[in-house]
């Protein structure tokens, strides 16, 4: 058996990109060259590694078993190639994912702190839904992600990270009394601005608030937390949002936080593929995030 680095790179690119066409663009090779290289690798193993579905190539069971090992080999090859270069160059090759609350509001600050403290570069960041992030973790397109711990996939390693408080916000001009902590029943018939069905935030709203309202009024449904906060700012209704996402709007007097009798929170985890090779650069980033969580207790706002 004479497996080449070219074959390993072709396999990894196709596994991550899902097609010969996309892999060829990533590798700066022609489509026939990538296709032939992949076929050569499959011949050496005497096994098919992908399901061919229309123009897509999807890893089969054998390919999924092989993926983490090839991913590790390519990472080590990249480390050798960059052994004498600036460490920040290696950081730029890391690819991490984050759900919208973390990715839009907290992660940029953390990456800047890591850069200032440790002199490292910035990784590539993908901000998206939990489902999209998990799919990219499975194909090793992402090295690591920050997602809700409630998300379950048996191929993930989860390391508990930080808690995110969920709060109810209202327009500044809202007539809802704030003298005493409120119950969900106090918010009957109030209009709500919510995330789209299928999002983790919408599921939290339905379980904590929506299911307990006898007369739930959804005034507006959007797919971005920023749009929800903006809608509340302009008087569209109440919203159930991440405290991390809303704290700037609260601090600047754009929205009000309603005092609730019940407290709501969700837990975020640092997740990696269970068979993922954790190189020194990725481990350093994970350690930084763990240290941040240990040193930071997000204070409650009122």
Image (tube, rainbow, N blue to C red):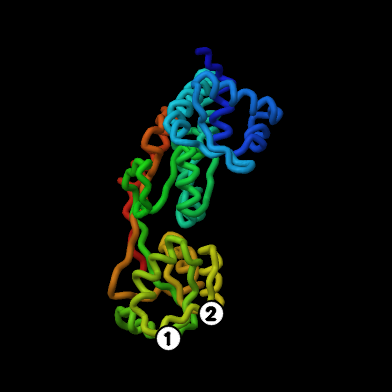
* Residue 164 appears anywhere in the view: yes
Q: Quadrant of the C terminus?
A: bottom left
* Residue 122 appears anywhere in the view: no
N-terminal of the pair, mark 1 or mark 2, is 1
Q: Nearer the viewer, mark 1 or mark 2?
A: 1
Task: Residue at 40% x, 65% y: name it.
Answer: 203
Real-space Cα separation, disc 1 to disc 2, in angstroms: 15 Å
Counting from the top left corner in percent of width and height, residue 55 is at 64, 41
Dot 2, how many residues are within 10 Å of its Cα: few (below 14), some (14-19), or many (20+)?
A: some
Query: Is 152 above or below relative to 272?
Result: below
Counting from the top left corner in percent of width and height, residue 10 is at 59, 27
Q: Which residue is mark 1?
A: 189
Foreground: 298 or 11?
Answer: 11
- Say what secondary structure mark 2 lies in: loop
- Say what secondary structure mark 1 lies in: loop
Counting from the top left corner in percent of width and height, residue 263 is at 30, 68
Task: Residue at 36% x, 66% y: name it.
Answer: 301
Foreground: 195 or 1?
Answer: 1
Counting from the top left corner in percent of width and height, residue 258 is at 38, 76
Write down the quadrant of residue 15 in the picture.
top right
**Cβ atoms at labels 1 and 2 below 8 Å apart:** no
Outermost residue toward the top? 2
Q: How many marks?
A: 2
Dot 1, how many residues are within 10 Å of its Cα: few (below 14), some (14-19), or many (20+)?
A: few
Query: Is 167 above or below relative to 279?
Result: below
Q: With 145 as the anchor, is 28 left or right in this view?
A: right
Query: Is 183 above or below relative to 280?
Result: below
Q: Which residue is mark 2?
A: 235
Foreground: 279 or 252?
Answer: 279
Q: Which mark is residue 240?
A: none
Task: Residue at 45% x, 40% y: name it.
Answer: 138
Task: Residue at 28% x, 75% y: name it.
Answer: 261
């Amino acid at each position: 058996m004479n497996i080449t680095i070219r074959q390993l790179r072709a396999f990894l690119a196709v596994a991550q990109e899902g097609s010969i066409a996309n892999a060829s663009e990533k590798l700066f090779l022609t489509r026939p060259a990538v296709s032939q290289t992949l076929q050569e690798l499959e011949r050496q193993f005497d096994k098919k590694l992908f399901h061919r579905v229309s123009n897509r190539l999807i890893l089969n069971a054998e390919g999924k078993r092989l993926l983490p090992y090839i991913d590790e080999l390519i990472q080590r090859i990249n480390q050798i190639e960059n052994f004498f270069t600036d460490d920040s160059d290696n950081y730029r090759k890391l690819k991490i994912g984050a759900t919208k609350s973390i990715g839009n509001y907290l992660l940029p600050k953390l990456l800047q702190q890591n850069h200032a403290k440790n002199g490292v570069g910035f990784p590539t960041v993908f901000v998206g839904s939990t489902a999209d992030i998990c799919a990219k973790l499975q194909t090793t397109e992402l090295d690591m992600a920050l997602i809700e711990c409630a998300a379950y996939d048996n191929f993930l390693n989860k390391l508990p990270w930080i808690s995110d408080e969920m709060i109810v916000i209202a327009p500044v001009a809202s007539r809802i009394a704030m003298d005493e902590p409120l119950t969900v029943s106090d918010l009957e018939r109030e209009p709500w601005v919510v995330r789209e069905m299928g999002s983790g935030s919408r599921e939290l709203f339905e379980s904590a608030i929506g299911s307990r309202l006898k007369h739930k009024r959804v005034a507006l449904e959007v797919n971005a937390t920023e749009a929800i906060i903006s809608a509340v700012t302009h008087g569209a209704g109440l919203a159930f949002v991440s405290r991390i996402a809303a704290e700037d709007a609260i601090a600047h007097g754009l929205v009000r936080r309603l005092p609730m009798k019940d407290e709501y929170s969700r837990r975020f985890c640092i997740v990696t593929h269970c068979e993922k090779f954790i190189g020194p650069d990725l481990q350093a980033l994970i350690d930084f995030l763990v240290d941040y969580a240990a040193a930071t207790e997000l204070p409650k706002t009122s």
